[in-house]
Image (tube, helix red, strand yellow):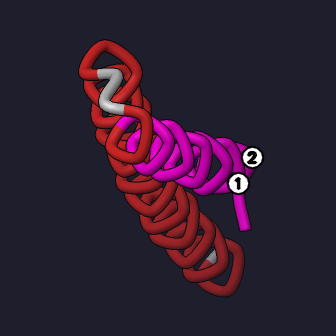
Amino acid sequence: MTDEKTEGKVDEGKGRVKEAAGSLTGDDSLKNEGKVDRAAGETKQKVGDAASKVGDAVGGIADRLKRKG
């Protein structure tokens, strides 16, 4: 797993905790902060996935070029 994906999972988890705590305590500010953290975490995970796919594609191309050359 890439660092970006790991960070994303952590941020998403923190966001869920904040969101739940905000809901339980009636703190809308904390709840909204949790939503933002969760969304940021989901975005980081998607960026990490995309980076992994690009890296895999580049690696595959490099392997093919090595075999031909």
The three-letter amino acid code for the residue at tag 1 is Thr
Q: Residue at x 58, y 54 (%)?
A: 13
Whether residue 62 is situated above or below residue 23 in the rendered picture: below
**Which residue is disc 1 drawn over?**
6
Q: CA distance from mark 1 to mark 2?
A: 5 Å
In x, y percent, where is residue 65? 58, 72
In x, y percent, where is residue 2? 71, 56
Residue 40: image quadrant is top left
Q: Residue at x 37, y 21 (%)?
A: 33
| Of 31 and 5, the residue lying toward us | 31
- State the residue lying farthest toward the top: 29
Q: Left or right: where does residue 47 sit relative to residue 61? A: left
Picture quarter with the N terminus: bottom right
Is residue 18 shown in magenta? Answer: yes
Circle 1: is it few (<14), some (14-19), or many (20+) Cα within 10 Å? some
Which mark, residue 44?
A: none
**Which residue is disc 2 drawn over?**
3
| Of 45 and 29, the residue lying toward us | 29
Q: Main secondary structure of the magenta part?
A: helix
For label 2, the SS is: helix
Instruction: Report if the CB atoms under discs 1 and 2 are less than 8 Å apart.
Output: yes
Residue 69: image quadrant is bottom right
Whether residue 17 is situated above or below residue 36 in the rendered picture: below
In x, y percent, where is residue 29? 31, 13
For label 1, the SS is: helix
The three-letter amino acid code for the residue at tag 2 is Asp
In x, y percent, where is residue 20? 43, 50
Circle 2: is it few (<14), some (14-19), or many (20+) Cα within 10 Å? few
Span of residues in magenta: 1-22
Whether residue 28 is situated above or below residue 43 in the rendered picture: above
